[in-house]
Image (cartoon, coloured by chain):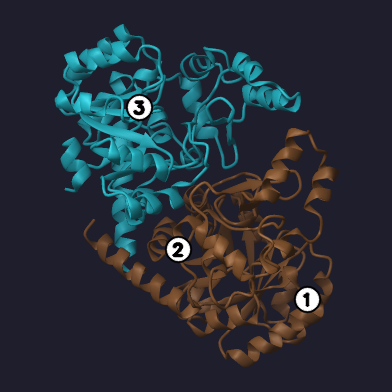
Chain colours: A cyan, B brown
Amino acid sequence: MNRITHLLQVQYPIIQGGMIWNSGWELVSAVSNNGGLGLLGSGSMYPDTLKDHILKCKKATHKPFGVNLPLFYPDIEEHIKIIIEEKVPIVFTSAGSPKIYTSFFQKHKIKVVHVVSSLKFALKSEEAGVDAIVAEGFEAGGHNGIDETTTFCLIPNIKKHVSVPLIAAGGIATGAQILAAQVLGAEGVQIGSRFAATIEASSHEKFKQEIIKTKEGDTQLTLKELIPVRLIKNKFYYDVVKAYGNKASKEQLEQLLGRGRAKKGMFEGDIEEGELEVGQSSALIDEILSVKDVFKQLISEYDKAISNAYSL
Amino acid sequence: MNRITHLLQVQYPIIQGGMIWNSGWELVSAVSNNGGLGLLGSGSMYPDTLKDHILKCKKATHKPFGVNLPLFYPDIEEHIKIIIEEKVPIVFTSAGSPKIYTSFFQKHKIKVVHVVSSLKFALKSEEAGVDAIVAEGFEAGGHNGIDETTTFCLIPNIKKHVSVPLIAAGGIATGAQILAAQVLGAEGVQIGSRFAATIEASSHEKFKQEIIKTKEGDTQLTLKELIPVRLIKNKFYYDVVKAYGNKASKEQLEQLLGRGRAKKGMFEGDIEEGELEVGQSSALIDEILSVKDVFKQLISEYDKAISNAYSL
């Protein structure tokens, strides 16, 4: 029992990242039922869809679950209304200022965890009164920070300057890495790609197959002028590279990215033309498992790592 | 005692990276005298200078020390001759194929450790018969790999596929990070920036001051068309950015970098016009210490981290 398991009321300090197009009620409830914290990925849901997933999640688990809420999304106000009405106990906010909604959620007895990628925003989050911080390194899949600070450097630096409970994210797919993150100063971990490659994830089977095929060096952080995003180097990525070669403007890049690329890749399974958001940890992921088996594996790897550490 | 301390005949599995313009005999002998392995940075030395530093190092310590040998340097053959004549017991080779010199050195009873930044080259190094591998993550200062794989993802992946003893590098400046690197699968660590900011480093005082001033986000990996290098974002760096904005050719970038930028920055202390090679770990380095005090600090932080780990 540490501050994170106490705060989130979970058995293990393992949080499943609320990844767009991956994190529906089946994944989320499976993670919560196995002792972690599942997060619905509201960033790819219309308000009605979010409500539907919350209701289904409540039926599928009696354990706590949460919603990941990217603050810059157009439907944000409606999402917030639903979360409060449905008494979701935890939100993970990201991609926006923690000052705007933190105390508002807390007045409704909702715990607020804010996602950051730098010490600067960790300090701002602490000042805004968040209950915990997720610090996400450069190796993470999907949206990322501009400073490119890695998990290995980010976690000890935030731990040194911030006293709010700290959750490490970015690059974590094994139990040994969970222990390493704790050694660096985290009290919990948020895991993305490993949970995207599960039977329960709502993403397309072809996308899951791509994750397990992905080797070291096959992902790249790009589109830094818009929002930096780490993705698999597929045809769409090389089209982006070509656009850079032609000195594309920000507007041209926006047009290339379009609105539907993430859905096309991860949900519809168009692995050539779609955007496949995956972290560097994909090199460590070799098979699609059930959530239950992911937990078994993480815990057995963790136990092995800690017994190895005794002999150091 | 593990495979690395046994191989290198050192008390601690802590290696000081052979950084150009920083790693002369004073730093190297101080590291070896304090129980680690010091490495001369031959990449910034003419053959005569290297010989001089080896001789001085031998006078200053009876413990083992080594030479870091970037294989693409013009004076490589003369450097090798001197290393063999002077019976330096260990070389760390980098920036070239491990196949060319490994068995040659080993015939002369010299241990060979090769530096890589990807699993692919780790496998090639194992095949070439190296005695150990340094795997260096994206967060490292100075020259770096093109795949941008971070220490947190690189180490477990190499550990999984390679059985040669593994030394982690990139982003390491604290004792807790040493333990984390071991948990990820390394048997030793190579540390750069923390040793550059010591009294004994041969670099300019102004450069050392810049390291301790550097905060998170103040370094960047750039010049990927030539050899990717992580450096402090100073005037020289922004000149590079400007050149990119003007669509500079590879030749123009080469011209901008010139031959003397690294010397100018790190050895002569021109912090505006010089190239200041520093890792992301600089955000964790707040003071210039003696090598003795760095070891004291690393070991006390390590002991604290391991006693914290017992309670996990």
| Residue B39 position in % (x across, y down) | 62, 75
The residue drawn where x is 36% and y is 11% is A75
Name the residue beneath numbered marker 3: A18
What's under tag 1, amino acid-wise?
Answer: Ile
Is disc 3 in the same subunit as disc 2? no
The residue drawn where x is 52% and y is 27% is A227
Q: Is residue B174 above or below residue A143?
A: below
| Residue A59 position in % (x across, y down) | 17, 17
Q: Nearer the viewer, residue B183 or B143?
A: B143
Query: Quick check: A26 left or right of B182?
Result: left
Mark 2 vs 1, N-terminal side = 1
What's under tag 2, amino acid-wise?
Answer: Asp
Q: Nearer the viewer, residue A84 or B184?
A: A84
Name the residue beneath numbered marker 2: B286
The alpha-carbon separation of the residues under discs 3 and 2 comes to: 36 Å
Instruction: Identify the image quadrant of the C terminus of chain B.
Output: bottom left
| Residue B277 position in % (x across, y down) | 63, 58
